[in-house]
Image: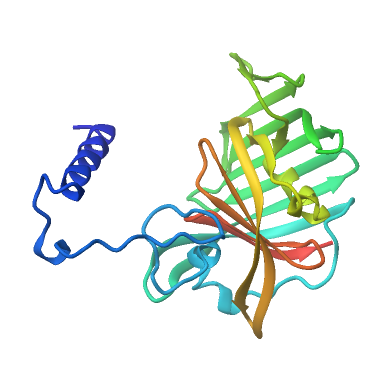
Amino acid sequence: MNRREFMQLSASAATLAAGGSLPLPAADRKRPKKRRATKFGPTSGPRNIFTEPSAIEPITGYLPKFKPAGAGSMTDPFTATYSLIQTYGSGATSRNTVSGSLTVSFKGAVCTSKEIRENRPANIVETKLRCTGALNTAKSWTLKSSVARAADIGFTESGVWDGKQMTVKVKSWTQKRATSHPLIGQWVLLRLLASGKLKKKPLEFDMLDNSTLRPDQTLRYCGKVEVPVAGGKVKLDCYAQTGYGILPTHYLVDNGGRVQLITQETVNWALTKLT
């Protein structure tokens, strides 16, 4: 039985049990507790019952040593450096470790990024994206993926978007994908969030995740959340992104438009430097 069949069978069994067609275990014969919905967006995976709102759930073990950046701006030009915070379990708080870094730079219409994931050996992904228009939609881009100390392992891709279709090319193949919304790079969202414009109206878009298309995304403002950090508590604006092919993602932004935290279940980012 493969994973998909197992998930379908489990879901069917759960439905029958909930409808009374199958007996529930003794501990579950009482009315099942409903998972509370919050205004801070949906979550995925098992909940940590000690944490509310869900936007900070994956990084509660890291937050006591997190110091929000208090200077700098995410308006053009800027360079933001993030620590990659991995989540590998939870109890009263999540269990976290720093397992990489992300650097995003914006200058004019060009956004560059370098992400290092400290595997053994480390994987490095570098991108250069040219943007256009008020939404900084993707125009053209290149991506280079490499593995530390393994020069023969890696690849380079290039892509363009004509407003209706994205085309990605590598040495041996070309792929075309139709789009139905503005195509926006994942890290370009930092500049859009910094502008504050997304508070007024949700953004519907297709996301360029490296060279992968994540269609039908929505990024909406959810209000303020209180976040415990080193030295006390801060209130940050919370934005939630949902859509096809991603885990629900939360962006926590301070009053200066700095995207301090990005949480996405097992892989999260914390701002460490802004220039």
Instruction: Please provide percent x and percent y for residue 198.
Output: 75, 50
Identified at 29% across, 63% down, the residue is: 33
To which quarter of the image does residue 11 belong?
A: top left
199 shown above or below 66: above
Instruction: Please provide percent x and percent y for residue 125.
Output: 63, 41
Identified at 86% across, 33% down, the residue is: 133
Q: How many marks?
A: 0
Name the quadrant of the N terminus.
top left
Instruction: Please provide percent x and percent y for residue 137.
Output: 78, 33
Q: Which residue is at the front of the view, 89 or 21?
A: 21
Instruction: Please provide percent x and percent y for residue 128.
Output: 76, 36
Name the quadrant of the C terminus.
bottom right
5 shown above or below 97: above
In this picture, residue 85 sits left or right of residue 46: right
In this picture, residue 157 sits left or right of residue 75: left
18 shown above or below 139: below
Q: Which residue is at the front of the view, 201 or 256?
A: 201
Identified at 49% across, 66% down, the residue is: 57
Identified at 39% across, 54% down, the residue is: 45
To which quarter of the image does residue 169 belong?
A: top right
